[in-house]
Amino acid sequence: MNILVVEDEKKVASFIQRGLEEEGFTVEIAVNGEEGSEKAESNHYDLILLDIMLPKKDGLTVLKELRAKEINTPVLCLTAKDSVEDIVAGLDSGSDDYLTKPFAFAELLARVKALVRRGAQDRGAEVFFADLRLDPVTHKVWRGEKEIDLTTKEYGLLEYFMRNPNQVLTRAMIAEHVWDYTFDSFTNIIDVYVNYLRKKVDKDHSKKLIHTIRGVGYVLKED
């Protein structure tokens, strides 16, 4: 498994590289946003660890440019910012996960393994529910004949719903399976993203598919 670490703090980059290589990963380092972009566009990686605050080109710009070029390599953002607004900004730019500095290596490793494992699962057959169709290879989604434009995290959330239809999914379950988080403070972001997804999936349709179970969570079901 090849991992690109885009991090300008030498001590942090060295700490990450040493730990991941001890776990059997192959690691390359880029020390600024421009170098990170060049490496990500010209080489294949199973995962990119991307610092947000980078010289020459910031991490969110790098991420947006990669996604615009349809480079769908999983990206774990690293940042000192931890507000809901900052996390949502990163996820909206195409990040698959978000880790706040400082962090323990064990937590980083757990996130890395989860994203690598999820990336391997993204090469399966299409998933269907009602008039929804999801292609895990291209990350495209349709309702009926109309394609739905989703961000990376909206796609991951919908995929989790579609692989578990007619089941009530608690916020804790969603946090663990879609974001690999387990702490309660993350539930505000889950509610934000479910609302984003509901507007895109159910808007202009009389048959609503995403339902709130008050005090519990959410469920994908036909009325």
Image: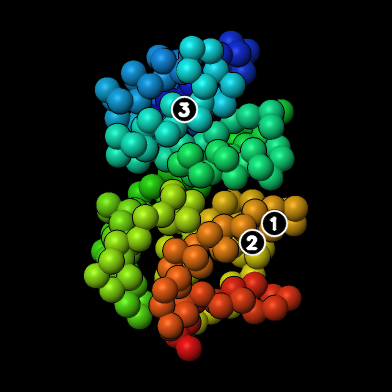
Q: Amino acid at mark 3?
A: Thr
Residue 213 falls in which quadrant of the image? bottom right
Residue type indicated by callout 2: Asp
Separation (CA) of disc 3 from disc 1: 25 Å
Residues at circles 1 and 2 in contact by the CB criterion of under 8 Å: yes
Helix, strand or loop at disc 2?
A: helix
**Residue 26 place in picture, x, y as percent:** 40, 25
Q: Is residue 125 above or below residue 58?
A: below
In the displayed orientation, state which residue is furthest to the front: 204
User: Which residue is under mark 1?
Assistant: 188
**What residue do we see at 35% from left, 41% from top?**
72
Mark 1: few/some/many CA within 10 Å (<14, 14-19, 20+): few
Q: Disc 3 to disc 2, how far (Cα)?
A: 26 Å
Picture quadrant of residue 193: bottom right
Quarter of the figure with the N terminus: top left
Picture layout, residue 54 above or below residue 216: above
Q: Where residue 191 is drawn, which disc sits there?
A: 2
Whole-percent x, y for residue 172 in the image: 66, 63
Q: Please indicate whether residue 106 sits to the left or right of residue 177 in the image.
A: right
Give the mark nearer the N terminus: 3 vs 2.
Answer: 3
- Rendered residue at 24%/70% (across/down): 145
Crowd band around label 3 with a 10 angstrom C-alpha radius: few (<14), some (14–19), many (20+): some
**Marks 1/2: CA–CA distance:** 5 Å
**Residue pictured at 49% horizontal, 65% vertical:** 199
Residue at which label 3 appears? 61
Q: Residue furthest bottom?
A: 223
Residue shown at the point (29%, 30%) measured from the top left: 44
